[in-house]
Amino acid sequence: MSMPPPGDLSPAPDDHPGSGHRPAPYGRTGPISQPYQGPPGAAQGMPPGPPPAAPPPVPYGGPQYGYVMPMPQNELGLWSLVTGILSWVVCPLVLGVVAIVTGHAGMKAVREGKANNAGAATAGLILGWLNVAMVAGGLLLWLIFGVAMVGVAGLGSLLSAG
């Protein structure tokens, strides 16, 4: 039996399966290198080189890893809250109606995903509706009181005439 040259893994003519001698994969001839050689320079007995450079820094104001842009706030919810508060101080009926209208528009924007300030829109709606209800109730009471006064005055003139 003849011995193959060093590094040659081709089968010998008298080898058969199960003999422990494997042929080179894919018809390769020559020595098989190790799958992992280590960093460059390590094979010659030198220490490995410096670590790879870090990626360049992100410019100021640029996108950052893991940063999620916040949902935009719709200003209608804020305006609803402001006009709802001001309706208790200045021009109650007009600002109350404005608070209701802007509050409904702000809530619609929240439902459509265009805003995230549902709390401000809801607070403006509540303040606006309370103010409009109180103004309407005050006007109703004033009207009832006025009719009652006219009725009492009319009854007094009927009693004194007769």
Image (tube, rainbow, N blue to C red):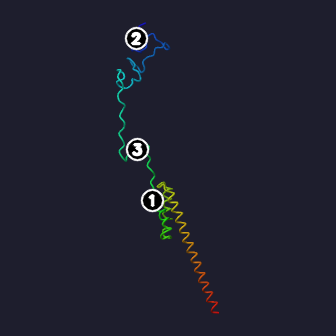
In the rendered structure, the answer to whether residue 98 lies left or right of residue 30 reads: right
Q: Mark 3 vs mark 2: give the one in front.
A: 3
Which residue ends up furthest to the bottom in the rendered image? 162
Looking at the rendered structure, the kind of residue marked 1 is: Glu
**Marker disc for residue 64:** 3
Residue 146 x/y as whole percent: 57, 80
**Marker disc for residue 75:** 1
Looking at the rendered structure, the kind of residue marked 2 is: Pro
Q: Residue at x 43, y 14 (%)?
A: 11
Q: Are marks 2 and 1 in contact (CB under 8 Å)?
A: no
Which residue ends up furthest to the top in the rendered image? 1
State which tag comes first along the sequence, 3 or 1: 3
Q: Secondary structure at mark 3?
A: loop
Q: Residue at x 36, y 23 (%)?
A: 42
Residue 65 against residue 74 in the figure, above or below: above
> Which quadrant of the figure contains the N terminus?
top left
Q: Residue at x 44, y 16 (%)?
A: 23
In the rendered structure, the answer to whether residue 54 lies left or right of residue 158 reads: left
Residue 121 against residue 149 in the figure, above or below: above
Q: Are marks 3 and 1 in contact (CB under 8 Å)?
A: no
Whole-angstrom CA distance, mark 3 to mark 2, is 60 Å
Task: Bin the neighbour count of mark 2 within 10 Å (Cα to Cα): few under 14, some 14-19, many 20 and up.
Answer: few
Residue 109 x/y as whole percent: 48, 57
Q: Mark 2 vs mark 1: give the one in front.
A: 1
Question: On the image, numbered disc 2 is attached to which residue?
Answer: 4
Q: Secondary structure at mark 2?
A: loop
In the rendered structure, the answer to whether residue 46 lies left or right of residue 75 reads: left
Whole-angstrom CA distance, mark 2 to mark 1, is 85 Å
Q: Residue at x 44, y 43 (%)?
A: 66
Looking at the rendered structure, the kind of residue marked 3 is: Gln
Residue 98 x/y as whole percent: 48, 66
**Marker disc for residue 101:** none
